[in-house]
């Protein structure tokens, strides 16, 4: 079943079968001012997208059972305006036409700053206000990337 970390910002549904990654994303995103809903499978994601006021989906593709591509298709069938960011370890999916309906495609090797930027841009494109904490978190993460790079 999906879990929700309540903050006042836009609601992001994080879908990943890896519990550790779900928890890391929950910490990053809730710290950036977003409300976070967690789902560990495609069916949970589809249910959460139907039952929660989700503003954006951060979606892993390689999951057992219903994969992310099928889950994305079902969520978009119900709500064509729902922005989905594919977040996967596999860059090869980028060439799969079934992923082209996603708002953005971010590989897991990307920095947290890149992920936060993709989320911000997708929400702003839809006219959603982005929390000040999200902008600050993006700047901090970009600064950390610059130090490491």
Image: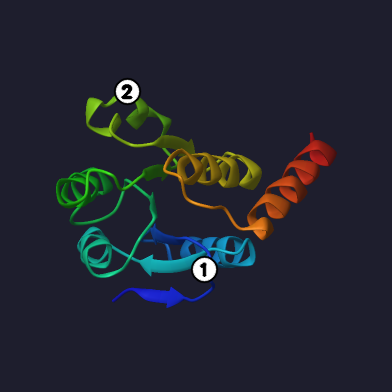
Which part of the image, by quadrant, shows the N terminus? bottom left
Q: Quick one: 24 or 115, which is closer to the camera?
A: 115
Give the Cα distance between marks 1 and 2. 29 Å
Label 1 packing within 10 angstroms: few (<14), some (14-19), many (20+) = some
Whether 38 is drawn above or below 97: the answer is below
- Label 2 near label 1: C-beta < 8 Å? no
Residue 48, located in which quarter of the rendered image? bottom left
Q: Secondary structure at mark 1?
A: helix
Task: Say left or right for 125 vs 140.
Answer: left
Chain-order first, disc 1 or disc 2: 1
Write down the residue under mark 1: 23
Whether 51 is drawn above or below 25: the answer is below
Whether 56 is drawn above or below 99: the answer is below
**Rendered residue at 27%/26% (across/down):** 96
The image shows residue 38 at horizontal and vertical percentages of: 39, 68
Residue closest to the far right: 147
Residue 101, located in which quarter of the rendered image? top left
**Rendered residue at 33%/37% (across/down):** 102
- What count of labels does the image hold? 2
Write down the residue under mark 2: 95
Q: Quick one: 53 or 91, which is closer to the camera?
A: 53
The image shows residue 18 at horizontal and vertical percentages of: 42, 62
Label 2 packing within 10 angstroms: few (<14), some (14-19), many (20+) = few
**Rendered residue at 56%/61% (across/down):** 29
Q: Quick one: 36 or 132, which is closer to the camera?
A: 132
**Rendered residue at 21%/50% (across/down):** 79
Which part of the image, by quadrant, shows the C terminus? top right
Q: Which mark is residue 76?
A: none
The image shows residue 59 at horizontal and vertical percentages of: 37, 50
The image shows residue 130 at horizontal and vertical percentages of: 57, 53
Q: Secondary structure at mark 2?
A: helix
């Amino acid at each position: 079943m999906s879990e929700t970390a309540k903050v006042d910002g836009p609601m992001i549904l994080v879908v990943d079968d890896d519990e550790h990654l779900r928890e890391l994303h929950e910490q990053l995103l809730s710290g950036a001012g977003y409300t976070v809903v967690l789902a560990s499978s495609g069916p949970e994601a589809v249910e959460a997208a139907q039952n929660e006021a989700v503003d954006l989906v951060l979606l892993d593709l390689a999951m057992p059972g219903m994969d992310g591509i099928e889950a994305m298709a079902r969520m978009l069938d119900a709500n064509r305006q729902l922005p989905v960011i594919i977040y996967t370890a596999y860059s090869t999916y980028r060439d799969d036409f079934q992923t082209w309906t996603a708002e953005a495609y971010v590989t897991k090797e990307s920095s947290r700053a890149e992920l936060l930027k993709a989320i911000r841009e997708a929400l702003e494109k839809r006219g959603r206000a982005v929390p000040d904490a999200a902008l600050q978190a993006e700047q901090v993460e970009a600064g950390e990337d610059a130090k490491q790079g």
